Image (cartoon, grey):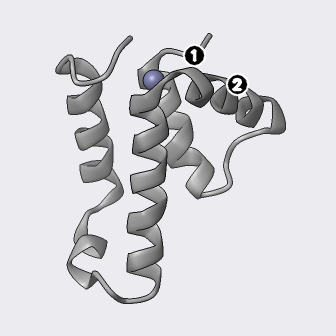
C-alpha cells in the first residue's frame, strides 16, 4: 500500500505522464480508500485545467521546486496520513 506521501508524488508525476500502468493502479487503489489524496488529486487536476486555460495565470508562477516544497510540507506536517 502506498503512503500518502508516495501517493501525492505519483499524482504530480501523473500530471506529467511520468508514471507506469502499475503505478497508476497503485495510485487508484490508494485513492479508493484515502479521501485526502483523492481530494488532492482532484484539486491538482482542477488547478492544471485553470492554468492551461489561462484562467489562473498567477498559479503558473509556481516552479516545480516550489510545488515539491508544498507537497513535502503537507506530507510532513500531519495534514496527510502516512
Ligand atoms: Zn492518502
Left or right for 29, reference 65: right
Tell me the tag on residue 2: 1
Percent coordinates x, y for residue 74 in the rendering: 24, 31
Categorize mark 2 by other alpha carbons within 10 Å: few (<14), some (14-19), many (20+): some
- The residue closer to the viewer here, 54 or 60, is 54
Q: Residue at x 47, y 52 (%)?
A: 42
| Image position of 17 with respect to 13: above or below | below
Q: Is residue 27 left or right of residue 12?
A: right
Residue 7 x %, y %: 52, 29
Helix, strand, or loop for circle 2? helix
Question: How many labels were placed on the picture?
Answer: 2
* Labels 2 and 1: the sequence-earlier one: 1
Residue 39 figure quarter: top left
Q: Residue 64: x and y, percent?
A: 35, 55
Q: Is mark 1 within 8 Å of ligand 1?
A: yes
Q: Quadrant of the C terminus?
A: top left
| Ligand 1 located in image quadrant | top left
Element type at mark 1: loop
**Residue 10 place in picture, x, y as percent:** 56, 36
- Return the mark for residue 81: none
Circle 1 packing at 10 Å, graded few (<14), some (14-19), many (20+), is some
Residue under label 2: 26
Residue lying furthest right in this view? 21
Q: Is residue 32 left or right of residue 24?
A: left
The answer to which of 25 and 67 lies nearer the viewer is 25
Quarter holding residue 2: top right
Q: Residue at x 68, y 24 (%)?
A: 29
Q: Are marks 2 and 1 in contact (CB under 8 Å)?
A: yes
For marks 2 and 1, give the CA distance. Answer: 7 Å
Name the image quarter holding the N terminus: top right
Amino acid at each position: 500500500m502506498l503512503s500518502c506521501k508516495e501517493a501525492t508524488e505519483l499524482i504530480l508525476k501523473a500530471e506529467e505522464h511520468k508514471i507506469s500502468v502499475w503505478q497508476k493502479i497503485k495510485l487508484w487503489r490508494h485513492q479508493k480508500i484515502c479521501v485526502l489524496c483523492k481530494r488532492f488529486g482532484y484539486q491538482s487536476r482542477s488547478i492544471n485545467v485553470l492554468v492551461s486555460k489561462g484562467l489562473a495565470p498567477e498559479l503558473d508562477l509556481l516552479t516545480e521546486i516550489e510545488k515539491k516544497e508544498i507537497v513535502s510540507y503537507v506530507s510532513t506536517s500531519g495534514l496527510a496520513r502516512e
